């Protein structure tokens, strides 16, 4: 099982707020192919303060799902300074920076509503605009 | 752990298995994947993706095409320089 898709903060927020169905359809697509959708830890942290209580409940369920379609990707010690440097190129957006670093590492596509910022960090074809 | 089962299949399905090196593994993978899909769809509904927000087969297929096209462009771009060497 490989991580084929990475969500950034904007994509995580959209899913948890039921803001459209594209993110859910993407998660479903990746799962049906036998792969996983990765949610970087910093994307979750960046989103968390912006969430209403019911959205936090949804988040807890999403990340707790045993053998589910998503996996939380931790920030490894080797990547801390890399993510910090990368975030400096996108106005300190740590959620996007961690997502971009993980997208590169896993050779996965990054799904985001912040396509312009994401393309500062990744190639055009590495980014799926939501 | 494994269990030995005896099952009956329509000819069409059995013909598919005839072409598989390991029919048991093939069937096991299909069953596990189908069960994960069912549980994922349940999760979507539990999260509120119901009614006009329901995640449907058609929506999944549409997104599969979109993601697949993007990945194909990436593959082609990355394979390009190597092929011209």
Image (cartoon, coloured by chain):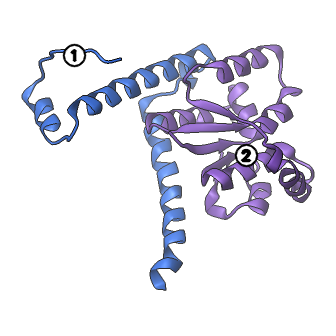
Chain colours: A purple, B blue
Mark 2 surroundings: few (<14), some (14-19) or many (≥20) residues within 10 A: some
**Badge 1: chain ID:** B
**Residue A59, above or below A24:** above
Seen in the image, is B83 located left or right of residue A93? Answer: left
**Residue assigned mark 1:** B4
Q: What element carries label 2?
A: loop
- The image quadrant where one finds the C terminus of chain A is top right
Tell me where residue A66 appears, x and y as whole percent: 58, 19
Task: Give the residue drawn at x 64%, y 32%.
Answer: A71
**Residue assigned mark 2:** A113
Mark 1 surroundings: few (<14), some (14-19) or many (≥20) residues within 10 A: few
Q: Do the residues labelled 2 and 1 touch (CB within 8 Å)?
A: no
Task: Give the residue drawn at x 53%, y 79%.
Answer: B81
**Residue A128, above or below A124:** above
**Badge 2: chain ID:** A
Q: Give the distance between the C-alpha atoms of the residues marked 2 and 1, in whole angstroms.
A: 49 Å
Q: Is mark 1 on a helix, strand or loop?
A: loop
Extreme front residue here?
Answer: B1
Indicate which label's residue lies in the foreground, 2 or 1: 1
Tell me where residue A69 appears, x and y as whole percent: 56, 29
* Residue B50 seen in this snapshot: no
Tell me where residue A36 appears, x and y as whole percent: 55, 37
Tell me where residue A18 appears, x and y as whole percent: 68, 26
Seen in the image, is A125 located left or right of residue A92? Answer: left
The residue lying toward the viewer, choosing from B22 and B34, is B22
The residue lying toward the viewer, choosing from B85 and A43, is B85
Task: Give the residue drawn at x 71%, y 61%.
Answer: A122
Seen in the image, is A120 located left or right of residue B64? Answer: right
Mark 2 and mark 1, same subunit? no
């Amino acid at each position: 099982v490989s991580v084929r898709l990475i969500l950034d903060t904007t994509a995580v927020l959209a899913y948890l707020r039921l803001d459209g169905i594209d993110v859910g359809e993407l998660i479903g697509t990746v799962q049906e192919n036998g792969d996983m959708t990765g949610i970087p830890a910093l994307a979750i942290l960046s989103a968390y303060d912006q969430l209403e209580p019911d959205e936090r409940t949804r988040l807890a369920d999403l990340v707790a799902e045993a053998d589910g379609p998503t996996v939380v990707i931790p920030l490894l010690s080797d990547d801390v300074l890399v993510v910090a440097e990368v975030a400096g190129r996108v106005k300190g957006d740590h959620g996007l920076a961690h997502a971009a670093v993980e997208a590169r590492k896993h050779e996965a596509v990054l799904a985001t509503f912040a396509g312009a910022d994401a393309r500062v960090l990744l190639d055009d074809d590495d980014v799926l605009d939501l | 752990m494994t269990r030995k089962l005896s099952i009956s299949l329509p000819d069409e399905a059995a013909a598919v298995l005839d072409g598989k090196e390991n029919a048991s593994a093939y069937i096991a993978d299909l069953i596990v994947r189908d069960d994960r899909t069912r549980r994922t769809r349940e999760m979507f509904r539990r999260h509120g993706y119901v009614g006009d927000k329901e995640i449907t087969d058609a929506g999944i297929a549409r997104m599969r095409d979109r993601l697949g096209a993007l990945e194909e462009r990436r593959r082609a771009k990355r394979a390009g320089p190597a092929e011209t060497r």
